[in-house]
Image (cartoon, grey):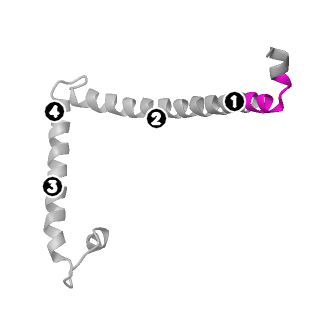
Amino acid sequence: MTLQELLQNSNTLILLAGCCVGLFLFGGIIGFVLQILGIGFGIVGGVLEFIVNIVSGGPIAWCGCLVLLFACAGCGGLALLIASVLPQCGTPQAVNLCRLFGY
C-alpha cells in the first residue's frame, strides 16, 4: 500500500487530523499549566526566601532569632487562648470562637 492510497482512505485522514488536533490542544494545555505552576512556585519561593532571610539574621545578626522567638511565643499563646476558651462552649458566656470550631 503506497502513501497515496493510505491518505485516500477517509478513516486514516480523520485519525491523522484527530491526532494533530489532540497534540496541539494537549501541548497548549501543558504549556499553560506549566506557566501557572512556575508562577506559583516562584511566589512561594520568594516568600520562603524572605522568611529565611529574616530568620537568618539579615543585616543584624540577632534580629532574625528574636523574630523567630516572638513568632513561636505568639503561636503558643494563641494555642493556649483557644484551649482555655473552648471548654466554655455551651455555657452562657460562650463566644463566637465556639461557632468557628462547631461547638
Considering the image in quadrants, where does the N terminus appear? top right
Q: CA distance from mark 2 to mark 1?
A: 31 Å
Residue tagged by mark 3? 77
SS type, badge 1:
helix
Instruction: For marks 3 and 1, give the one nearer the viewer.
Output: 1
Q: Is residue 19 left or right of residue 101?
A: right
Q: Earlier in the sequence, mark 2 or mark 4?
A: 2
Instruction: For marks 1 and 4, give the one nearer the viewer.
Output: 1
Q: CA distance from mark 3 to mark 4?
A: 18 Å
Instruction: For marks 2 and 4, give the one nearer the viewer.
Output: 2
The residue that appears at 39% across and 29% down in the rendered structure is 46
Q: Give the image location of residue 18, x and y in percent.
A: 73, 33
Q: Give the image location of residue 9, x and y in percent.
A: 83, 28
SS type, badge 2:
helix
Residue tagged by mark 4? 65
SS type, badge 3:
helix
- Disc on res. 27: none
Q: Amino acid at mark 2?
A: Gly
SS type, badge 4:
helix
Q: Amino acid at mark 1?
A: Cys
Q: Residues within 10 Å of mark 2 (few under 14, many from 20)?
A: few
Q: CA distance from mark 3 to mark 2?
A: 32 Å
Q: Which residues are magenta?
A: 7-16
Q: Are marks 2 and 4 in contact (CB under 8 Å)?
A: no
Helix, strand or loop for the magenta stretch, by majority = helix
Relative vertical location of residue 32 with respect to residue 93 in this rendering, above or below: above
Q: Earlier in the sequence, mark 3 or mark 4?
A: 4
Residue tagged by mark 2? 40
Q: Residues within 10 Å of mark 4 (few under 14, many from 20)?
A: some
Q: CA distance from mark 1 to mark 4?
A: 58 Å
The residue that appears at 19% across and 31% down in the rendered structure is 63
Q: Residue furthest top?
A: 2
